[in-house]
Image (cartoon, helix red, strand yellow):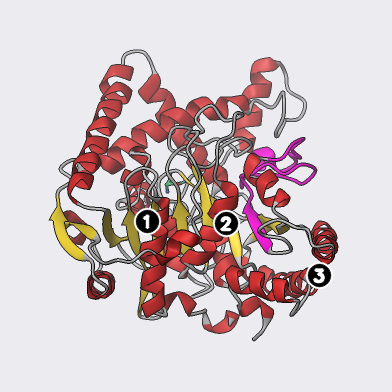
Amino acid sequence: MDLHAKTLTELKAGLEAGDFSSLELTEALLGRIEANDETLNAFITVMRDQALAAARRADEARAKGNGGALNGLPIVHKDIFCTQGIKTTCGSKMLDNFVSPYDATVVERLDAAGAVVLGKTNMDEFAMGSSNETSYFGPVKNPWDLARSPGGSSGGSAAAVAARLSPAATATDTGGSIRQPAALTNTVGFKPTYGRVSRYGMIAFASSLDQAGTITRSAADAALMLGVMAGFDERDSTSIDHAVPDYVAGLEGSLQGLRIGIVRQHFDAGLDEKTGAAVREALSVLESKGASLTEVDLPNLDYCVPTYYVVAPAECSSNLSRFDGVRFGHRAEDPEDLLDLYCRSRGEGFGAEVKRRIMTGTYVLSAGYYDAYYLQAQKVRQLISDDFRKAFEDVDVIAGPTTPTPAFKLGDKTDDPITMYLNDIYTIGANLAGLPAMSAPCGMVDGLPVGLHLVGPHWSEDRLLAVAHQYQQDTDWHTLAPEDFQ
Ligand code: GLN
């Protein structure tokens, strides 16, 4: 089997058995990236020299009997994670020339475990988008159909994993940006509990919603990555000191007696019929493995998207105020005075969607509107969290579709932000409530992948991974690769 066709778990076993070296593996994947990325546009930066050097170090460490849990295994980082000495753009012209003086905690931990970073992946500008079309570096193409979007904002990470350019990727999820692109590209997207993985060095979009996670080819691979990434970090004030279980060991948990909640509204008119049928079929597989299905009610579900589109822009308008053309980022040339410098630097550096969010956020936070919008949204957010808490008194996980439809055509939704925003209708609730959630491949509709969405109570990462892993023991959807990227 070609090396690129193997999963992270298989590659780990191969390296350990001495079947191939990290250098051979890294060279093979760099070659694949170079051959395919002009087509896919999944990368903003390819780190050839650094990757080869890291692979050599990993091979040397192994020869001496050393090396961490991911020693010599190639990965890619979403370009939202700061990497010392390597450009970090966040998909924006604003940071096109930004080289971070330090590493994000996620980057640091994966490095320390011996991972080999192949490059930094394309993304929607400042992670705002659901299609990768807001990137300053151009849209990413979906490897399953190049005319379609891979989803967003972590579209580059998802496309790179789906096209077998990297076995695993880091990504971030504020409203669905890991799970939605995973669903649209037939990959596994995992978003942990808020506070599980450090946000230090991860460029902030909406700080109370942002969470780092993974895009991989299997649940077992996600468990391997998460075990390295998770854990308390004193440099992130919202990081939570909660023990990190052995996620890989937890994969073997049985589904016997598992109570799965189904939300009726998730299967309403908004859901594409064939997508719904694929998800129902996945649920019956889980049932056949001993799980039971019950209906649960999330009465405030309809308010998830509107609440998110008040809270997220409010936080982004505040977070993005640091990009003023003075300390770092794009700076306008020949300013007349300070105000002109601010206005033109921001005017030139940010794209249309980011500006739309900053304006919305500034509006909902302004005196006179704060109570009517921002405060109100915070109250509704609490109600949504309460709904989940109540539902989890009766069930262990909630399952449903990740997205309403399979991948849509590039350009199809760009003129209509509301339709674009509705793509995250099933995923946003988990962010508002800080819950762990994931998407796993569960079918094909007219040659396009469908994702099964699983949400659990806080800290139930191990349970979600076990459910998906057990599902993947009986199904092979997750093993399917796009025809041109086998
Ligand atoms: N698509 C959503 C948005 O545009 C979510 C993005 C994300 O999760 N980063 O805000």
Amino acid of disc 1: Arg
Q: Distance of mark 2 from mark 1, alpha carbons?
A: 16 Å
Which residue position is annotated with label 3? Answer: 23
Please tell me how crowded label 3 is: few (under 14), some (14-19), or many (20+) other residues with Cα within 10 Å: many
Amino acid of disc 3: Leu
Mark closer to the chain start, 3 or 2: 3
Q: State the residue at coordinates (64%, 49%).
A: 79
Mark closer to the chain start, 2 or 1: 2
Mark 1 lies on a secondary structure that is: helix
Amino acid of disc 2: Met
Query: In the image, is residue 117 above or below residue 208?
Result: below
Which residue position is annotated with label 1? Answer: 463
Main secondary structure of the magenta stretch = loop
Look at the image and say whether residue 76 sits in the magenta stretch.
Answer: yes
2 vs 1, front mark = 1
Which residue position is annotated with label 2? Answer: 225
Spot occupied by residue 317 in the image (x, y as percentages of width and height): 49, 28
